[in-house]
Image (cartoon, grey):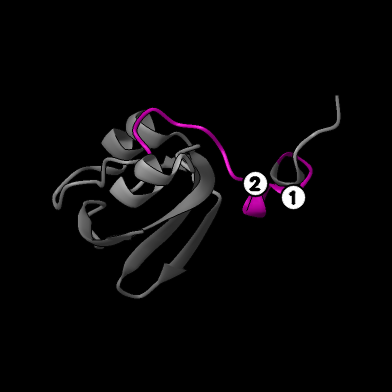
């Protein structure tokens, strides 16, 4: 069986599976809590304001009502991207989850 394209990518571009992919982090979480929830990030970057971690997850998009009615209701595999910004105290100060 051939590997999916995301399984052949370098680590920073790998899309991984996580049961928590659809659950965004909470502000104030520690880096340890984020690691235990999502695992190691795809990338990390440092700035004077703190650290930024980026994740790429495999997730399934749910069928819309129209797709169910027309019979086109197969789940589509789409990536979820998460960007978590930590403050200098090592706690989540902001995030983007899409």
Which residue: 31% across, 35% down?
A: 32
Mark 2 is surrounded, within 10 Å at the Cα level, by few (under 14), some (14 to 19) or many (20 or more) other residues, namely some
Q: Can residue 76 be spotted in the picture? A: yes
Q: Outermost residue toward the top?
A: 1
Q: Outermost residue toward the right?
A: 2
Cα separation between marks 2 and 1: 6 Å
Quadrant of the drawing holding the N terminus = top right
The residue tagged 2 is 14
Q: Residue 72, percent across and down?
A: 49, 43
In this picture, residue 70 sits left or right of residue 30:
right
- Where are the magenta residues, as a range? 7-21
Which residue: 35% across, 75% down?
A: 48
Magenta run includes residue 86 = no
- Name the residue nearer the viewer: 71 or 97: 71
Above or below, 40 against 82 in this view is: above
Magenta: predominant secondary structure element? Answer: loop
- Name the residue nearer the viewer: 97 or 74: 74
Give the label on residue 88, or none: none
Q: Can residue 62 be spotted in the picture? A: no
- Name the residue nearer the viewer: 51 or 20: 20
Q: Secondary structure at mark 1?
A: loop
Q: Residue 89, percent across and down?
A: 21, 56
In this picture, residue 38 sits left or right of residue 93:
right
Mark 1 is surrounded, within 10 Å at the Cα level, by few (under 14), some (14 to 19) or many (20 or more) other residues, namely few
Which residue: 52% across, 44% down?
A: 76
Above or below, 92 against 8 in this view is: below
Instruction: Report if the CB atoms under discs 2 and 1 are less than 8 Å apart.
Output: yes
The residue tagged 1 is 10
């Amino acid at each position: 069986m051939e590997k999916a394209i995301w399984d052949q990518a370098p680590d920073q571009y790998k899309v991984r599976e996580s049961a928590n992919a659809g659950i965004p982090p909470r502000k104030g979480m520690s880096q340890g809590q984020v690691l235990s929830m999502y695992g190691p990030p795809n990338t990390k970057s440092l700035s004077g304001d703190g650290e930024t971690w980026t994740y790429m997850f495999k997730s399934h998009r749910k069928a819309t009502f129209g797709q169910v009615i027309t019979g086109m209701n197969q789940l589509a595999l789409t990536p979820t991207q998460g960007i978590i910004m930590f403050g200098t105290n090592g706690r989540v100060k902001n995030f983007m989850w899409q």
